[in-house]
Image: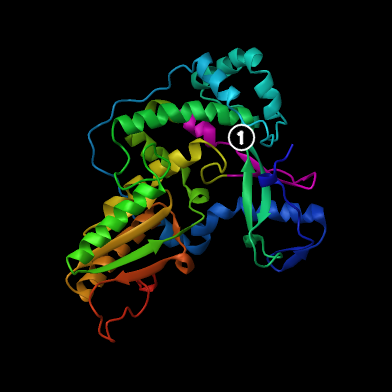
């Protein structure tokens, strides 16, 4: 069963490199090759020597956190989760239909809960739960260009039920110890786009009321979720008290595969060795852990994050002071990105300025901050 949001039609042709494929079986294979390489943007854009000499990612100095360990999942929680499933969502590659699972919840909840808890004991996740069906959705533009298609990842329903329970335990640990940066609003209870926007607007309006110049850079990262380096992520998790369950996280990421599915056709599987799983419940939380300490590099500027959407902004008595501070902070943030192997998308990053004063004609930014050599 496919709902409207996950149905797609293959293009009549697709270009990959210098080759244009018109056979549908080749088109879905080429889509899969393209999507599976999404997380390699940084590695392909950065020389090997630069990769090896990248600075270590910033890490907050915080008191040693209590050790985290998984607790047994309760049948009542699984029962509630399964009863709330959307029966019209698509089934994953395991072909377990959500409608079937919803209708049989009372019968299967107990053995499924046992299976979930066994995963904690063995530090293993069923391999079928690590296979994603990817559906290409056309965004607009050149139909031949695979970059004009958004990959929609569909995971098995049971994996998402399981991850929902795991995610609750992880976020409870992180939030109870105030681990997340106060300037991270993405995927957190009590935070959102509205709170992030109000915070930034209040800072800017306050500066303008003081008749100061303001400048901001809106930063876009290329394929950020797909580019997460697992070894760096494991180091982050270890520093936050997850050392005792790193074996589980290692298995969670190991041997993941994806296939492209469209018009009743299925490509062959390809390994996914980078990134957090698209369409997963854990993915956004793990990405927030990964990028959390980037805010430390902002220096004298202010910063706010909504997952991978970032605004860096500052204010001051003169335009020169503002631009100098913003450039210094941006350079430091850029180094942090390199340490995390995240690539800046210069074409989608923008700068803007606001003030109640009249600017002199010569008071202009010669080039966007992200274009200035660092």
Q: How is the image coloured?
A: rainbow
Query: Residue 206 at what x, y percent from top left?
Result: 21, 60
Against 147, residue 77 (above or below) is: above
Query: Residue 310 at what x, y percent from top left?
Result: 38, 56
Quadrant of the frame with the N terminus: top right
- Taking the magenta stretch, the answer to whether it contains residue 361 is no
Against 137, residue 326 (above or below) is: below
Seen from this angle, which residue lies furthest right?
23
Quarter location, residue 324: bottom left
Which residues make up the magenta segment?
Answer: 247-272
Is residue 374 among what the camera can see?
A: no
Label 1 sits on residue: 130
246 vs 268, left or right, is left
Query: Residue 113 at what x, y percent from top left?
Result: 56, 17
Is residue 212 among what the camera can see?
A: yes
Quadrant of the frame with the C terminus: bottom left
| Residue depicted at 23% across the width and 41% down the height | 61
């Amino acid at each position: 069963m496919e709902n409207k949001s996950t149905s797609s039609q293959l293009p009549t042709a697709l270009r990959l490199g210098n080759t244009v494929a018109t056979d549908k079986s080749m088109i879905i294979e080429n889509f899969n090759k393209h999507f599976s390489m999404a997380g390699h943007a940084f590695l392909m854009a950065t020389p090997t020597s630069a990769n090896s000499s990248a600075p270590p990612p910033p890490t907050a100095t915080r008191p040693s956190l209590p050790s985290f360990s998984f607790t047994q999942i309760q049948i009542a929680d699984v029962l509630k989760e399964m009863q709330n499933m959307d029966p019209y969502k698509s089934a994953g590659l395991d072909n377990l239909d959500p409608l079937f699972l919803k209708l049989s919840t009372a019968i299967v909840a107990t053995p499924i809960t046992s299976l979930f808890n066994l995963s904690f004991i063995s530090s293993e996740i069923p391999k079928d739960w690590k296979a994603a069906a990817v559906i290409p959705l056309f965004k607009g533009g050149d139909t031949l260009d695979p970059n004009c298609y958004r990959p929609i990842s569909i995971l098995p329903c049971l994996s998402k039920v399981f991850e929902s329970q795991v995610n609750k335990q992880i976020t409870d640990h992180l939030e109870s110890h105030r681990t997340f940066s106060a300037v991270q609003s993405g995927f957190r209870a009590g935070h959102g786009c509205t709170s992030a926007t109000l915070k930034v607007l209040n800072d800017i309006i306050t500066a303008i009321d003081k008749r100061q110049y303001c400048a901001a850079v809106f930063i876009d990262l290329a394929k950020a979720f797909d580019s997460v380096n697992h070894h760096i992520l494991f180091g982050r998790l270890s520093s936050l008290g997850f050392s005792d369950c790193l074996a589980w996280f290692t298995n969670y990421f190991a041997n993941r595969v994806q296939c492209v599915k469209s018009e009743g056709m299925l490509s062959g599987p390809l390994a996914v060795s980078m990134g957090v799983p698209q369409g997963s419940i854990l993915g956004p939380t793990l990405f927030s852990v990964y990028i959390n300490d980037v805010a430390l590099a902002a220096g004298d500027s202010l910063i706010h994050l909504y997952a991978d959407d970032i605004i860096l902004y500052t204010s001051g008595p003169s335009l020169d002071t503002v631009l100098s501070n913003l450039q210094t902070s941006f350079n430091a943030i850029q180094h942090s990105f390199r340490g995390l192997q995240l690539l800046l998308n210069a074409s989608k990053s923008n700068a803007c300025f606001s003030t109640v004063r009249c600017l002199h004609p010569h008071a202009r930014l010669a080039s966007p901050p992200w274009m200035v050599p660092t």
